[in-house]
Each structure stands twice: as C-alpha cells, then as structure tokens.
Amino acid sequence: MNSEQCSSRSRAQFSRDWKDGVEITAEGKTTAEFSNHYNAKSNTCFYLLTVSSPGTRKKMLFDINGGELYGEFQGVADIDLPKPPMPKACRVESFYCASEREWHVLIEPYMED
C-alpha cells in the first residue's frame, strides 16, 4: 500500500459509512468527517473518523486494512472550554487520556512520519 491507495481506500470507506457526512436525527444534525495518513514506517493506513452531534464529539482511529481500532475519544464537542468535563472515553492503544488535546498528542505518531 502507498499514500495514494490509503487515501482512496479511506474515501471509499467514508462514503460507504457516511455518504455525504451529514445525518439528521431527532436529536439534531450529526456530521462526520475523516482524514487519513499512510505511515510508511509501519506500512499502515490510518483512518481518523470524527463524528459530531449536538454537544458531543467522537473520534476513532483505525487501521483501514485490518479494521483494528487504535484509539477512541468521546466527549464534549467544545475543546475551547477552559476546563472541559472528563471525556467518556479517551484512549490510544494502552494509553489513557483526560482530554481531547491529550488524545491528539497520543495519535500524532500514527498520523505523521
């Protein structure tokens, strides 16, 4: 696999799961977006899915090929709060975190070379 194949496979996965990235539910509008990164060192295509709905945000980091979930964040949608409440879920592999900012620090090695 290479960077181009990673991008293409990620886009196809997102389209299958989310079509245009917007879903209207009784609770309001839910939006989804994705990014991907081919990590040459590990020969892995990482797929980062972000789903936002009223008041919450969920992020999941997958290996697009094996489907393995590397990390997950679920918490309040506003990371700009001075002290956001503890997230419901915040981990990357065996590391746990206490905020969305910490989660982003933990996923950096996967999303860059």
Image (cartoon, helix red, strand yellow):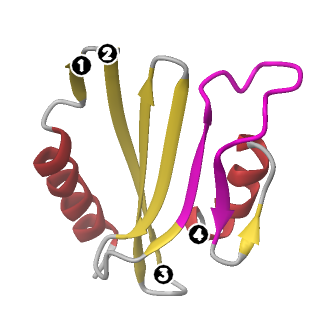
Where disc 4 sits, the SS reads helix
As shown in the figure, which amino acid type bears the numbered disc 2?
Answer: Lys
Residue drawn at x 55%, y 19% is 55
Q: Residues within 10 Å of mark 1 (few under 14, many from 20)?
A: few
Q: x, y percentage for residue 42? A: 51, 87
As helix, strand or loop, the secondary structure at mark 3 comes to loop
Q: Earlier in the sequence, mark 4 or mark 1?
A: 1
- Sequence-wise, the earlier of marks 2 and 4 is 2
Q: Mark 2 near mark 1, Cβ–Cβ under 8 Å?
A: yes
Tell me the residue that label 3 is attached to: 40
Which amino acid does the dot numbered 3 rest on? Ala
In space, the residues marked 4 and 3 are separated at their CA atoms by 10 Å
- Along the horizontal axis of the image, is 10 left or right of 95? left
Task: Verify CB contact (< 8 Å) between mark 3 and mark 1.
Answer: no
Magenta region, residue range: 71-92
Nearest to the observer: residue 6 or residue 83: 83
Q: In this figure, which residue is indicated by the disc labeled 4?
A: 110
**Badge 3: how crowded within 10 Å, few (<14), some, or many (20+)?**
few
Query: Which residue carries the number 2 mark?
Result: 29
Q: Residue at x 88, y 20 (%)?
A: 82
The quadrant where residue 28 appears: top left
Q: Which quadrant holds residue 113?
A: bottom right
Upstream in the sequence, badge 2 or badge 3? Answer: 2
The amino acid type, in three-letter code, at marker 1 is Thr
